[in-house]
Amino acid sequence: MSLQIEAIKCAMIGGHSVVRIVASNGVDGIGVAEHHKGTIAQQVLAFRKVLIGMDPTNVERCMRKIRQRGAFKPWGAAVSATEVALWDLAGKAAGLPVHKLLGGKVRDDVRVYNGAKRPPLTDYSPRDYAANCAAIVSYPEGFTIVKQPVAFHGPMKAEISDFYYGTVQTNAYPGTIESGMLTAKGFDHLVACVAAMRAELGPDIGLALDCGPGFTPKDAVRFARAIEQYNILWLEDLVAGDYAPYTRADVFRDICQASPIPIHTGEQIYLRHGFKDLIETRAVDIVGPDPLDVGGIAELKWIAEYADMHGIMIAPHGTGNGLIGLAVLTQVCATLPDNFIAFECPDAHEPLWYDILDGIDDFTIKNSHVHVPDTPGLGVRFNVAKAAAHLAPDDKDFFT
Ligand SMILES: [Mg+2]
């Protein structure tokens, strides 16, 4: 008798919208949306109409029913969280970790970089950036790659007066796009910050920069050339990315061909189809899909394989994904080809997550790596007795 999906539930726990799918034998699977996306309940609960009664271990057959119900970030979250829950359920039903269902791991330890795991910057000066880098490398995770937000990514554009020829928006959604030419002052400040970070980190720690979007194409190339000597791992989202609902593959290709530093984008893109032009025209050197936005675990693996065929690297996004997302990224990144660099460290956002998720200790980051566990499914499970205490009154049936 094949399994059937009997229930699909959604609740908000500790700042994350979480999905739970329950099969006819009582086995369940869990998925999660990024911290800042708000509830995805309306979209996820609508999937009941087409998924109830289906065999959850036929993940792709289920996905063919719902994949058209997503779009670029944040609108791919519901489909992605559901896909993740199906893999978790399929793994637990088979008694195998998700990475085995994807063909098995090719590495026992997966490299992680800091991403948003850093103290807040204060005045966006070179000294501030250097101190921030020093704090990050002192963390117990032992990060060997540090990524920092500069220019149009984050507050530098507003905190540094006359940084660019444009108007900073206020009261805007995260990822609101501001764009313009850099002033001479802004350009020099930016380069000085990069120099200070490299001097602080020394040659043993990789440095990547999240830059935009917001650069003009020419400023992007001028910036890349000006900091060539600092051995930067990648420049991220210079002209699109973050929450941009488009890719600008042609503009990225112009920049990529002129840049001595690897060019990275893709955290907002939905499905493999969104990466087609970027990969086939070799418009970037590194792609960065997020499994919780791109359409799920299998989607990310497919993109990694296709990128590898074209000489393109992959460094997946994950900053808002929480501790379930840490397990998701570990499982899929264990299976990727040699073009894998590192994934972005998800943050717990609220400390309660360490208390309500059994198995999370297996994902402790040491020496900048997560050891790949062999426990079934994603490798993390809700401690129901503890997690249920954090459910809102309307979500009380989430674990029943
Ligand atoms: Mg980014």
Image: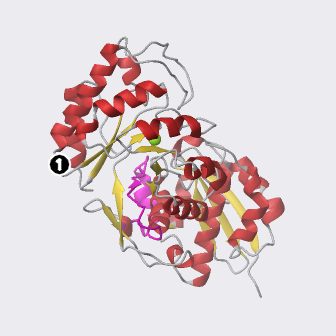
In the rendered image, the residue lying farthest to the bottom is 1
The answer to whether any part of residue 313 appears in the image is yes
Image spot of residue 365 (x, y percent):
31, 61
- Of 325 and 100, which appears nearest the observer? 100
**Residue 282 image position (x, y, % from top left):** 52, 49
Q: Secondary structure at mark 1?
A: loop
Residue at 54%, 26% in the rendered image: 177
Residue highlighted by disc 1: 203
- 327 lies above or below 244: below
Residue 75 % position (x, y): 66, 44
Where does the image place residue 15, in percent across and percent down from the top left?
52, 46
Hey, what amino acid is under mark 1?
A: Pro
Asked if the magenta segment contains residue 347, the reply would be yes
Q: Nearer the viewer, residue 156 or 166?
A: 166
| Above/below status of 24 relative to 209 | below
Q: Residues within 10 Å of mark 1 (few under 14, many from 20)?
A: few
Q: Measuring 53% from the left and 52% from the top, which residue is drawn there? A: 290
| Front-lying residue, 320 or 234 | 234
Viewport quadrant of the C terminus: bottom right
Q: Is residue 392 visible?
A: no
Q: Does residue 220 appear to the left or right of 199 in the view shown?
A: right
Q: Residue at x 40, y 25 (%)?
A: 155
The range drawn in magenta is 334-361
The quadrant of the rendering that contains the N terminus is: bottom right
Which quadrant holds residue 247?
top right
Count numbered badges in the picture. 1
Q: Is residue 328 left or right of residue 116?
A: right
Q: Kindly identify the residue that appears in the image at 35 percent across and 12 percent down.
A: 161
List the single residue furthest toward the right.
49
- Way the structure is coloured: secondary structure
Classified by dominant secondary structure, the portion drawn in magenta counts as loop
